[in-house]
Amino acid sequence: LPDWSQHLGLVKEALGDPIGAIRVEAAKLLARKVKVAAVFFLLRSLVSDDDPAVRRIAIEALASHPTPDIVEPFFERLPQADAYE
């Protein structure tokens, strides 16, 4: 879709898919629109995702758009973070 952000519900459904590759692709789509408030909050919740690939995409997207709102989820993640994160 040219502007998939109008169909955010479908992307949210893809984030809940049991197939990891679909979840990763959905996270990549979200990362492109990090400045959209609804997307920002979805990415913020993915910082603690169980899938390291999804988590990495969310962290990188949020870090590329630094705001004070990312400090709390990043600090919450620190105790479980690996060296890359």
Image (tube, rainbow, N blue to C red):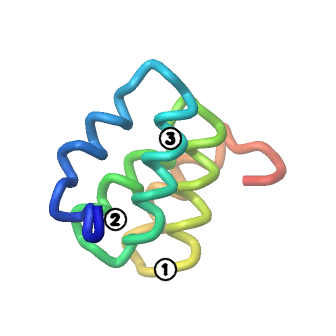
Disc 3 secondary structure class: loop
| 13 lies above or below 46 | above
Q: Which residue is mark 1?
A: 65
Which residue is at 43% across, 46% downward? 26
Q: Most extreme residue toward the top, as rendered?
A: 18
- Assign a secondary structure to mark 2: helix
Q: Report the disc number at residue 51.
A: none
Q: Based on the displayed image, in which of its 4 quarters is residue 33 positioned?
A: bottom left
Q: Earlier in the sequence, mark 3 or mark 2?
A: 2
Say whether disc 2 or disc 1 marks the residue closer to the N-terminus.
2
Amino acid marked by disc 2 = Phe
The residue drawn where x is 61% and y is 64% is 60
Residue 8: % across, % down: 21, 53
| Horizontal side, residue 51 vs residue 45: left or right | right
Given contact means CB atoms under 8 Å apart, are the residues at marks 2 and 1 in contact?
A: yes
Residue type at tag 1: His
* Classed neighbour count for the residue bearing mark 1: other residues with Cα under 10 Å, few (<14), some (14–19), many (≥20): few
Q: CA distance from mark 3 to mark 2?
A: 14 Å
Residue placed under numbered mark 3 in the picture = 48
Say if 60 sits above or below 49 in the image.
below
Q: Identify the mark at residue 40; answer none if there is no mark.
A: 2
Q: Secondary structure at mark 1?
A: loop
Q: CA distance from mark 3 to mark 1?
A: 18 Å
Q: Position of residue 35 (x, y in %)?
A: 34, 78
- In the rendered view, would you say 78 is above or below 40? above
Kind of residue at badge 3: Ser
Distance, label 2 to label 1, CA atoms, is 9 Å
Q: Position of residue 69 (x, y in %)?
A: 37, 71
